[in-house]
């Protein structure tokens, strides 16, 4: 067996048939993106005073432009749809993960370059955006791998 035909979990990868780990990863990613959808819905339905602890944080949330909220919606809902596409083994997962990742980058540009969220929320604020970006990249790469292996 070639090195490329065996996955890290030891399950042989048959052409066109993904291993169980594929479904586990896809389902976990779906949960992750669903949590993002919940965060988005919370942000758009809550009063800014409910979201921030300090007056500066409340002011930050009050000033978030609609295009940033749209990017957040695209990133989270796009990720959910991409995960569904992975689970049903549809090739549309790949462009959906790409669009979702692009929307994450749009949010990050606003938060860190245009609005200076770091000065409002502090360095601990970096953890979640770095995690979101990392998972977005990982899922895009995973979808590309799935496509190459014939799973999509």
Image (spheres, rainbow, N blue to C red):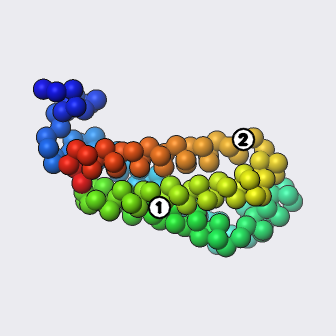
Question: How many discs mark residues in the rendered view?
Answer: 2
The mark nearer the N terminus, 1 or 2, is: 1
**47 or 111: nearer the viewer:** 111
Q: Is residue 34 visible?
A: no
**84 or 39: nearer the viewer:** 84
Q: Is residue 92 visible?
A: yes
Res. 41 image quadrant: bottom right
Contact check, label 1 and label 2, Cβ < 8 Å: no
Res. 43 image quadrant: bottom right
Q: SS for tag 2?
A: helix
Query: Quarter holding the C terminus?
Result: bottom left
Residues packed near mark 1 inside 10 Å, few (<14), some (14 to 19) or many (20 plus): some
Query: Quarter holding the N terminus?
Result: top left
- Position of 46 with respect to 32 (left or right) is right
Query: Which residue, as the protein is rendered here, is positioned at the far right?
Result: 55
Residues packed near mark 2 inside 10 Å, few (<14), some (14 to 19) or many (20 plus): few
* 81 in relation to 6, above or below: below
* 151 in relation to 99, above or below: above
Q: SS for tag 1?
A: helix
Res. 14 image quadrant: top left
Q: CA distance from mark 1 to mark 2?
A: 27 Å
- Position of 7 with respect to 111 (left or right) is left
Nearer mark to the viewer, of 1 and 2: 1
Query: Which residue, as the protein is rendered here, is positioned at the far front?
Result: 148
**106 or 120: nearer the viewer:** 106
Q: Which mark is residue 99?
A: 1
* 13 in relation to 1, above or below: below
Q: Which residue is mark 2?
A: 124
Q: Residue sitting at 70 percent across and 59 percent down?
A: 110
Q: Position of residue 142 (x, y in %)?
A: 36, 45
């Amino acid at each position: 067996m070639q090195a490329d035909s065996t996955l890290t979990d030891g399950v042989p990868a048959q052409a066109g048939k993904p291993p169980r780990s594929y479904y586990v990863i896809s389902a976990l990613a779906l949960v992750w993106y669903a949590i993002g959808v919940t965060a988005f819905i919370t942000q758009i339905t809550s009063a800014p005073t409910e979201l921030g602890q300090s007056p500066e944080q409340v002011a930050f949330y009050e000033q978030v432009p609609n295009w940033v909220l749209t990017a957040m919606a695209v990133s989270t809902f796009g990720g959910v749809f991409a995960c569904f596409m992975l689970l049903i083994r549809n090739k549309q997962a790949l462009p959906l993960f790409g669009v979702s990742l692009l929307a994450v980058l749009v949010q990050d540009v606003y938060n860190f370059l245009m609005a200076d969220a770091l000065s409002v929320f502090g360095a601990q604020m970096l953890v979640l955006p770095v995690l979101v970006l990392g998972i977005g990249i990982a899922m895009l790469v995973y979808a590309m791998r799935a496509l190459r292996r014939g799973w999509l």
